[in-house]
Amino acid sequence: MKTIEIKSAWQGNSDCNACSIRSSALFAELNEEDFSKIHSPIDDLRFEANAGIYTQGDSAEHLFTLREGYIKLLHINSDGSTRIVRLVMPGDLFGMEALLGKSYAHSATALSNIHLCRIPKAIISSLGEESPRLHRQIVKKWGEALTQSESWFSEINTGRIEVRLARFFLRIAKSSGDMAVAPLFKREDMGLMMDVKFETISRALASMAEQGLISNIGKLSIQIPSIKNLEGFSQAGV
């Protein structure tokens, strides 16, 4: 993980009222009066792939909303072993430990080039007391994160590795008709997600390509010739 100085990632202050993902982000339900009460700047940041956003154990002073790209939340165990516990996707809120006044429970690292908003927890604390709309959205986002984490472990940690990969690609794929494209991350990262060796990931991808389930395996993405076929394969669960 490479550390990036915030000043080099800073793109200015975010205009939350005009945000392209506002409907799915933390401030979705806020109105003009609510926005007028935001006095601290919300930073608009961009990072390259592999950049560290924060490290496990750091003081949690900010929450984050991801606007573009993908982020892994990595937990480091006491014995030094690591495990990716969540994949953060566009529109997701992360770093919610800040609401509890604690240190970050995981390390956040960019899996791709990313665009995010960094929100001081003071904003959430002050607005949360005055705006029931924000409180509802915080509860909703926290619930979504818990549900995503639970389904994540269920979907990608049971069944044959090819089936688990199929479920994973279906979760993150962008469709165009019956075809789709899904991002592809480093084999080591995917191995950490699914608790297998990276060689196992490589073999499984090759097997899925031979079966016609995926194609055009590149460095950053794969193609899915038929969503319907991949769904059928993933539901077989064998």
Image: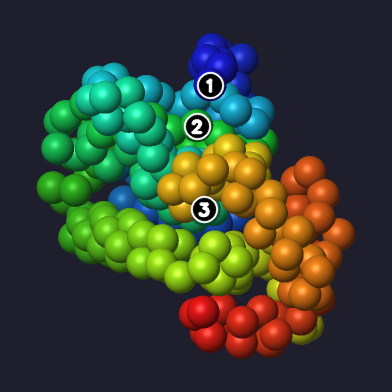
Asked if residue 219 can be seen in this view, the reply is yes
Residue type highlighted by circle 1: Met
Q: In the image, residue 62 lies at what x, y percent?
A: 32, 30
Which residue: 37% across, 23% down? 55
Q: CA distance from mark 2 to mark 1?
A: 7 Å
**Amino acid marked by disc 2:** Thr
Q: Secondary structure at mark 3?
A: loop
Q: Which mark is residue 109?
A: 2
Cα gap from disc 3 to disc 2, whole angstroms: 12 Å
Which of 15/161 is in front? 161
Separation of residues labelled 1 and 3 (CA atoms) = 19 Å
Q: Which of the two discs, 3 and 2, sits closer to the camera?
A: 2
Residue 89, numbered label = 3
Task: Pick whichever of labels 3 and 2 is earlier in the sequence.
Answer: 3
Sequence order check: which comes first, mark 2 or mark 1? Answer: 1
Say which residue appears at 64% left-offset and 31% top-offset: 49
Query: Dot 3 surroundings within 10 Å: few (below 14), some, or many (20 or more)?
Result: some
User: In the rendering, at what x and y percent does residue 182 appear?
Assistant: 70, 60
Say whether disc 1 or disc 3 marks the residue closer to the N-terminus.
1
Pointer 1 residue: 1
Q: Who's the residue at 47% across and 52% down the image?
A: 194
Q: Position of residue 10 (x, y in %)?
A: 57, 22
175 or 66, nearer to the observer = 175
Nearer to us: label 1 or label 3 = 1
Identity, as a three-letter code, of the amino acid under mark 3: Met
